[in-house]
């Protein structure tokens, strides 16, 4: 970790605050979210995307191949398109067919290899990839927007804002598979000098190219109807994002990958700590920029007046709550004061004031504050590589282990696991589709195959066991007598020194809200327009307002935080 990051860590917020479920659920995407950092790198290196193959019938059924030249490396994105009956389209990852299936391939794509992809990729879970293919993905056409946009373009017109709601997209993706699944390239096999060696960059490239395909596909279908059809232009040229939906599976993911969770939180918290520590001046360009972005964010949320957001604030409610922060930023620019107090650290004063207005308000402000500081861009990218090795250290004395567990996991003392409400739920995978699910203990079937994601309960039991053990015993002696604690011991020992590795929650409790963890993860990816459909899953969009392929080739990665409607 660099000196700049170490300095930021020394002033960062405490992990108990950062990892509270409510705080996680208030996060918004930042310049360090994967979608943003990917496009910044692609534009900086002027990656080019060319359409090598386009064989589509009038309905948009066929195949397309895009060639990507990325910092001297050639990749291909092969997409296979069909049209499904509406009743076969679903948000769920366990669907059996999709309108679009696609593969991101490293290297050249001769006809023989394309033929292999054509046979395998549409089969998805039933297919088999070659070792030079990086990502498989799939998507469906939007039931609400795809045909509408085709109709408008064929009529020579642009879409109408009022018809598109608050989270418009043309395709909705349902999965991005990589890292060995189906035989795909394992991440560790990607060479250090490869432009996709950064974690999650392959998936972001595939998602961005799906979005590019969605634009080409609607314009093709419109042009078939009318040779003089319009193309998406002005603000519409970049407004549409890529739709996505996520469910309960994301919650066990962060439990099963605590090193990844620590890295993701560090990638958010350290840039924020750095920003909050910076001196400010009323006439500084950054002050003007913060005011501009806050005003835009307020307008962005005010526009989103139809998006379902419960249990979170609606867009207009959030916009109204931002009014006070916007006024305080204006006060600082005018008088050098925040709430009447002179300050040379306005960001911290605004952060504290926004916190009093609510976590979601502060989440928006924090994204804005991080946006105006690019000093940590390269360092943050390097945080994402993790060593997920978990080991037991058998020679450690039990007294030391207990001190470590108390220091790192003292928060589990908040939960009383003799209270039935603290173990109201259990987590398992469905037999048919292997989807992670929650069941009500004592009511729903499946307890016999419960997943071991009960970290709070396991560590609580470990602390009780260590409380009766001789402090001079070694861990090996303790585990010989209490082997059921091995998993908790390995976790406590292996995660020492990782402050952000555990969500401060009891996932079995009746009051646990999965949406909080899901929203955090989606913010890390770079998604927006959160629309919960229940307590267990939500819809989002990715890349709305983002640069298109031609923009990136020209080196353009302009400002697209909180993009307003055309």
Image (cartoon, rainbow, N blue to C red):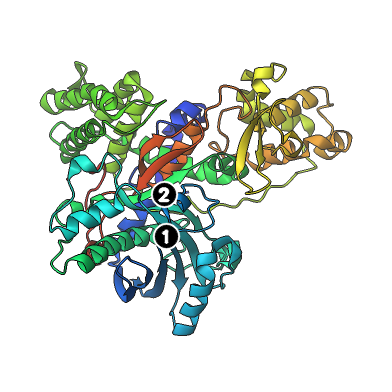
Front position in the image: 122 or 224: 224
Tell me how many marks there are: 2
Q: Position of residue 119 (x, y in %)?
A: 52, 74
Query: At x 58% / y 61%, what residue is drawn?
Result: 125
Dot 1 lies on which element?
loop
Quadrant position of the C terminus in the picture = top left
The answer to whether residue 193 is seen in the rendering is: no
Q: Nearer the viewer, mark 1 or mark 2?
A: 1
Q: Position of residue 383 (x, y in %)?
A: 47, 50
Q: Which mark is residue 99?
A: 1
Front position in the image: 426 or 191: 426
Direction from residue 234 to residue 513 in the image, left or right:
right
Q: Which mark is residue 563?
A: none
Whole-Å distance between the Cαs marked 1 and 2? 36 Å
Q: Residue furthest right?
A: 481
Quarter occupied by residue 456: top right
The residue where tag 2 is placed is 380
Quarter occupied by residue 355: top left
Q: Residues within 10 Å of mark 1 (few under 14, many from 20)?
A: many
Q: Position of residue 6 (x, y in %)?
A: 45, 42
Q: Position of residue 441 (x, y in %)?
A: 69, 26
Q: Earlier in the sequence, mark 1 or mark 2?
A: 1
The answer to whether residue 368 is seen in the rendering is: yes
Query: At x 47% / y 63%, what residue is drawn?
Result: 197
Residue 199 position (above or below residue 376)? below
Residue 419 position (above or below residue 84)? above
Query: At x 54% / y 71%, what residue is drawn?
Result: 120
Front position in the image: 184 or 362: 184
């Amino acid at each position: 970790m660099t000196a700049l990051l170490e300095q930021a860590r020394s002033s960062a917020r405490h992990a108990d605050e950062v990892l509270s479920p409510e705080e996680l659920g208030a996060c918004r995407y930042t310049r360090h979210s994967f979608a943003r950092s990917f496009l910044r790198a692609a534009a900086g290196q002027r990656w080019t995307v060319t359409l090598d193959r386009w064989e589509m019938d009038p309905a948009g059924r066929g195949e397309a191949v895009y060639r990507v030249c990325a910092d001297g490396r050639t990749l291909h994105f092969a997409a296979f398109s069909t049209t499904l009956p509406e009743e076969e389209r679903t948000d769920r990852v366990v669907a059996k067919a999709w309108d679009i299936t696609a593969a991101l391939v490293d290297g050249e794509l001769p006809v023989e290899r394309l033929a292999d992809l054509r046979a395998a990729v549409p089969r998805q879970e039933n297919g088999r990839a070659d070792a030079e293919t990086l990502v498989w993905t799939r998507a469906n056409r939007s039931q609400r927007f795809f045909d509408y946009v085709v109709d408008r373009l064929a009529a020579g017109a642009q879409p109408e804002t009022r018809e598109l709601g608050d989270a418009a997209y043309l395709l909705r993706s349902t999965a991005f598979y990589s890292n060995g699944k189906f035989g795909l390239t394992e991440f560790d096999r990607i060479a250090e000098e490869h432009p996709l060696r950064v974690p999650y960059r392959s998936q972001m490239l595939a998602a961005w190219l799906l979005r590019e395909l969605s634009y080409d596909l609607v314009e093709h279908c419109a042009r078939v109807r009318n040779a003089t059809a319009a193309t998406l232009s002005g603000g519409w040229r970049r407004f549409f994002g890529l739709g996505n939906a996520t469910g309960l599976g994301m919650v066990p993911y962060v439990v099963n990958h605590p090193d990844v969770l620590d890295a993701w939180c560090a990638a958010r918290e350290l840039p924020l700590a750095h920003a909050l520590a910076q001196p400010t001046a009323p006439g500084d360009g950054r002050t003007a920029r913060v005011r501009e972005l806050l005003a835009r964010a307020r307008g962005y949320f005010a526009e989103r007046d139809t998006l379902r957001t419960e249990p979170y604030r609606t867009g207009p409610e959030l916009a109204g709550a931002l009014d006070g922060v916007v006024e305080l930023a204006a006060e600082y620019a005018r008088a050098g004061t925040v709430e009447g107090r002179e300050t040379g650290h306005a960001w911290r004063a605004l952060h504290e004031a926004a916190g009093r207005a609510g976590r979601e308000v502060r989440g928006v402000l924090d994204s804005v504050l991080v946006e105006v500081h690019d000093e940590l861009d390269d360092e943050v990218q390097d945080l994402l590589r993790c060593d997920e090795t978990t080991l037991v250290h058998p020679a450690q004395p039990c007294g030391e282990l207990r001190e470590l567990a108390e220091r790192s996991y003292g928060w589990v003392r908040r939960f009383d696991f003799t209270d039935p409400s603290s173990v109201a739920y259990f987590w398992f995978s469905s037999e048919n589709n292997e989807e992670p699910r929650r069941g009500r203990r004592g009511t729903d079937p499946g307890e016999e195959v419960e997943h071991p994601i009960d970290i709070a309960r396991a560590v609580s039991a470990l602390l009780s066991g260590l409380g009766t053990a001789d402090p001079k015993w070694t861990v090996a002696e303790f585990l010989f007598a209490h082997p059921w604690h091995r998993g908790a011991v390995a976790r406590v020992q292996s995660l020492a020194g990782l402050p952000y590795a555990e969500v401060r929650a009891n996932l079995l409790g009746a009051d646990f809200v999965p949406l909080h963890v899901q929203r955090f993860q989606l913010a890390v990816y770079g998604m927006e327009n959160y629309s919960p459909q229940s307590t267990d899953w939500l819809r989002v969009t990715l890349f709305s307002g983002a640069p298109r392929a031609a923009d990136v080739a020209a080196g353009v990665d302009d400002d697209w935080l909180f993009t307003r409607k055309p």
